[in-house]
Image: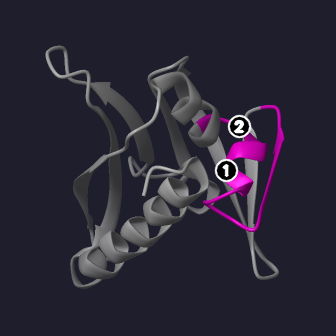
Amino acid sequence: MDDKIKFEMEFPIHVSPSLLYQYISTPSGMSEWYADNVNSRGEFFTFIWEGSEEKARLLGKKTGERIKFRWVEDEETDYYFEMRIVVDEITKDVSLIVTDFAEEDEIEEGKMLWENMVSNLKHVLGSV
């Protein structure tokens, strides 16, 4: 298996950090933009897209700031995906920082996927 490469993306979002956190950290919020359906049981989240399921373990979260997952299929690795909310101290602009991993030949595809998903999120939040 090829080593995956870490990448980060920043998305300005015009919405309150507390509302944004609800959409990135709860199954109901994530079902609105990230997957067709999201269920959680304890530390495990199940993401459902068009009939296929992927499970992820919640690695950590800090209320109002970030949430971090690892796909169950990557349990034996250091790979994860994280969504962090950053507020500029001066302008108070809110950004969502996404950290993820992809194989070298899939990085552009991974970035496009996140761009599409965050575009859905902005639409749901009315922050287009």
In the rendered image, residue 84, in percent from the top left (x then y), is placed at 38, 34
Residue for point 73% across, 56% down: 31
Answer above or below: position of 111 versus 59: below
Residue for point 35% across, 48% down: 98
Tell me whether the residue at label 1 lies in contact with that at label 2, contact meaning CB atoms closer than 8 angstroms.
yes
Q: Is residue 18 magenta?
A: no
Range shown magenta: 25-42
For mark 1, what is the residue?
A: 30
How many residues crowd around disc 1 within 10 Å: few (fewer than 14), some, or many (20 or more)? Answer: some
In the rendered image, residue 32, in percent from the top left (x then y), is placed at 70, 56
For mark 2, what is the residue?
A: 26
The quadrant in which the C terminus is found is: bottom left
Q: Is residue 23 left or right of residue 47?
A: left
Residue for point 26% across, 30% down: 93
In the rendered image, residue 42, in percent from the top left (x then y), is placed at 81, 31
Answer above or below: position of 127 versus 88: below
Answer above or below: position of 16 versus 76: above
Q: Is residue 40 magenta?
A: yes
Q: Is residue 92 left or right of residue 16?
A: left
In the rendered image, residue 7, in percent from the top left (x then y), is placed at 23, 57
